[in-house]
Image (spheres, grey):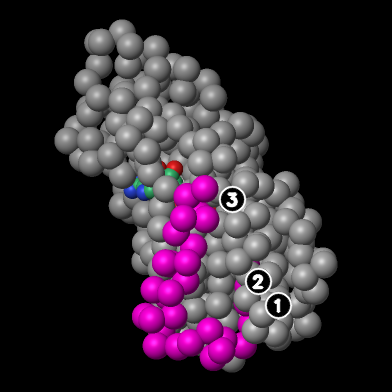
Amino acid sequence: MISLGIESTAHTFGVGIVKDSEVLANVRDLYTTEKGGLIPVKLGEHHVEVCDKVLSQALEKAKLSIKDIDIVSFSIAPGLAHSLKVGATVARTISLVHKKPLVGVNHAIAHLEIGRMLSKSNDPILLYASGANTQVIAYDGGKYRVFGETLDNGVGNFIDSFAREAGLGFPGGPKIEQLALKSKNYIELPYSVKGMDVSFGGLLTNLTTKLKSGKYSLEDLSFSTQETVFAMLVEVSERALAHCEKDELVLGGGVACNKRLQEMCRLMCEARGAKFYCPENQFLVDNGAMIAYLGLIMHKTGNSAQVRDSKIRPYERTDDVVVNWR
Ligand code: ATP
Ligand code: FE2
């Protein structure tokens, strides 16, 4: 069975095509800016501009025509309404014109399921570290439960805000990673883990003050930022592994592209005898393949929707979704 998946929760418009557990295509177009800052209306306009091109490229890559597709999946939640609407509209149109079943999927759960499929792990903890989201998720009692999360910004948005203060443009994460490689000088920063949750607001204020003081190099601040926030994420992930008595950790989300975060997670897992898996970057960042894959497994368990029931759900939480496909 072949599923076409459309991703448009935020800055990325992506189309993926998946045949069972084989990814045939995964094409994306990212909205970027020189100075940082994302305007929701602009994201929607970007997605309208590129949707046709991204869809054609994905079909071409998979050597398929739209008629070969069995189901159409799209990210129905959560995200920015202006962005979500574009993907939903494209998906509904294909569904209506070509008479294909439609499946709306939760984007956070798609990160987890593609990681679970690629790693062939059975019951992992997911550290989902992206721009807008930072959650530690695990399956329990018919739902994906959030065991820990950010109390304010997502870790990626926090890093991007710091990068913007430093005049680095969007996305800031990869630039901060490169700058961090040039330093080993740790500057003390606030470390904010509250139970199973993390927060970044105080840290951003502290960092911005340090940056503006002119007393610290951007390399040292970048290095210290990574060491501090990744230690926070590793701490809550480890506690979730222990609390849930699970022994597999999977990464998801754009921030998980960071090699230092991967290394710190790997070391923690080795130390406690857990398995660690990090998908390749194209499946960590927002992408259509993960939407296609989750749509496929949901469809097989009867989760398709009628167009009239396919309203976007910008605020849906991971643990709102009843997981009946496992
Ligand atoms: P979501 O909708 O799932 O919250 P998102 O819209 O923020 O995700 P992603 O593509 O998952 O999108 O992640 C983008 C974020 O990842 C940006 O904040 C970006 O700075 C960050 N990022 C990308 N590469 C790196 C890296 N190497 N190191 C740190 N952060 C990174
Ligand atoms: Fe994402």
Residue that badge 3 annotates: 83
Residue that badge 2 annotates: 93
Residue at left offset 32%, top offset 16%: 211
Q: Position of residue 132 (x, y in %)?
A: 55, 43
Instruction: Classify residue 97 as left or right of residue 6.
Output: right
Q: Position of residue 113 (x, y in %)?
A: 58, 70
Q: Is mark 2 within 8 Å of ligand 1?
A: no
Question: In front: 94, or 22?
Answer: 94
Residue that badge 1 annotates: 96
Which amino acid is tagged 3? Ser
* 281 part of magenta stretch: no
Query: Callout 1: 10 Å neighbours few (<14), some, many (20+)?
Result: few
Q: Nearer the viewer, mark 2 or mark 3?
A: 2
Secondary element type, mark 3:
helix
Which amino acid is tagged 1? Leu
Rendered-image quadrant of the C terminus = bottom right
Quarter of the figure with residue 277: bottom left
Cα–Cα span, label 2 and label 3: 16 Å
Mark 1 and 2 residues: CB-CB less than 8 Å, in contact? yes
Residue 147 in sight in this render: no
Magenta residue span: 45-74
Which callout, 3 or 1, points at the residue further toward the start of the chain? 3
Establish if 196 lies above or below 100: above
Secondary element type, mark 2:
helix
Q: Position of residue 53 (x, y in %)?
A: 42, 67
Instruction: Classify residue 121 as left or right of residue 243.
Output: left
Instruction: Classify residue 227 as left or right of residue 74.
Output: left
